[in-house]
Amino acid sequence: MRRATQLVAVVAVMAVSLGLAAGGDQDRTLTGSYLWTDTGKSGDLKAVFTPTGEAKWDVSFYFTFDGQDRVWSGTAEGTLSDGALEGTVLNEKKDRTFSFKGSFTDGEFSGSHAESGRSTGSLKLKEPSRRAQSSR
């Protein structure tokens, strides 16, 4: 019985190690663009997704708006490959809440954002290829 317990412990440690080595718990950085419908303003967008559970993420959006760098953070649920993704983020002062939703098709996200249920614009994201990341 003792040997079986040790074997289970070794297998569990190996499984966790392999999962970490494969990048299962690492941040995922996607880049793309946003469009603010009311003003017609647009710009580059970076989103960093940190896994917090099965298909659950902490997310931070980095962008420049009216010449000021912004970081809006919150949570998201869904996939970062093919399928639905949605979430909620707060601005820096935490006095405005924005939701976003959309879906990934062939590794590209296309979605919309809204404040208090009122559509405010769109966003597009894509994860840079692993080859491009490793050559930097």
Image (tube, grey):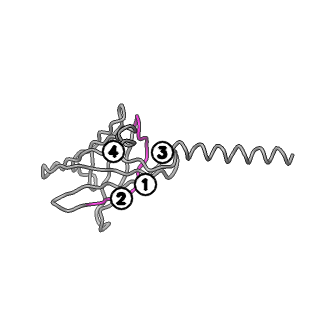
Residue beneath disc 4: 101
- Nearer-N-terminus badge (4/1): 1
Mark 2–mark 3 distance (CA, rounded to whole Å): 17 Å
For marks 2 and 4, give the one nearer the viewer.
2
Residue beneath disc 1: 58
Answer whether residue 128 is magenta in the image. no
Q: Note whether 74 is above or below 14 in the view shown.
A: below
Residue beneath disc 3: 55
Left or right for 79, reference 108? right
- Nearer-N-terminus badge (2/1): 1
Q: How many marks?
A: 4
Q: Position of residue 127 (x, y in %)?
A: 35, 41
- Nearer-N-terminus badge (4/3): 3
Neighbourhood count class around disc 1 (C-alpha, 10 Å): few under 14, some 14–19, many 20 upward: some
Residue beneath disc 2: 73
Identify the residue shown where x is 66% and y is 44%: 14
Query: Which of the labelled discs sits on residue 13, or is there none?
Result: none
